[in-house]
Amino acid sequence: MGTPEQSWSDEHIDVCFYYLRKKSKYDSNTLYKYSTVDCNFMSIINSVLAVYRIDDESLNAGGKEYHLNEYINGFRMHATVPWHMIDHIFIPINVKAKHHWVLMVISFNDRCIYVYDSLSSASHDAGVLAEVEKLAEVIPICLVSCKFYEKKGIDIATHPNYKSYDKMDLFDVYVVEDLPQQPSGSLDCGLYMVTYAECLTFGDIVSPVDFDPDLIHTRYASMLWDYDLKKEEENAQSDDEAPMRPPREISLTEDTEVHEI
């Protein structure tokens, strides 16, 4: 993580997003209400799209939608909260064809997905937007399935950002401009993505002032190393901070076989 010549892995990203998520959960004074997901989230999105059509009534067959709903209801990860309790969700996206990390932020009040990218070009942007489209299609379905809008208190019939859309319509997408950009040829896309996310935790904008990648590499590596040492000295262990999952309902039909064991 402290080496500029090395691209950040899923594990690096997940660790950083865990601490951002924990910061949000336990900082009651922050006005910017957010949470994060892990890198596996987009793998599940891709699985849904690879197996089912978006308009297929059997989308939930095989439990694919169930796994996404676990994220939304706050049952999937450490230090998480249900989505209806916050206003923004940070999602790390690995554009595998480009070997590149991008930050996407779902803003529920804006009904929009914001894209934060440390590279920009016509050919590159097309690959990024293809990933965004997957998210924009699936998320509305899952939010309705989880009764998110009722829990959040959003009346989609009267809310200014929702009333012109059907509840299943794709979310709007906005590519944020004037961001600090990684140097040409560098492998710092993961570093920039996490730094964008951390900047957003202090407000709703990322300053256009350029980052110092070497300094930020050192900072993140030092912070996580220090945290690990303190945990080891105190013999502390991370508890499972996700709420208990409710029992999963299984529908029995006349065709269901029940075996005694």
Image (cartoon, rainbow, N blue to C red):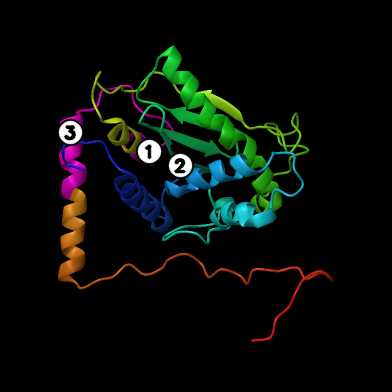
Residue at 75% across / 28% down in the picture? 164
Q: Amino acid at mark 3?
A: Pro
Up the image or down, 172 lies above or below 234; here it is above
Mark 2 lies on residue: 90
Mark 3 lies on residue: 4
Q: Which residues are magenta?
A: 195-222
Residue at 18% across / 68% down in the picture? 232
Question: How many numbered circles does the render carry?
Answer: 3
Q: Nearer the viewer, mark 1 or mark 3?
A: 3
Q: Amino acid at mark 2?
A: Phe
Mark 1 lies on residue: 197
In this rendering, would 169 be left or right of 125?
right
Residue at 54% across / 41% down in the picture? 46
Neighbours of disc 1 within 10 Å: few (<14), some (14-19), many (20+): many
For the residues labelled 2 and 1, the Cα–Cα distance comes to: 7 Å
Q: Indicate the position of residue 207 as horizontal and vertical percent values.
A: 34, 26
Marks 2 and 1 close (CB-CB < 8 Å): yes
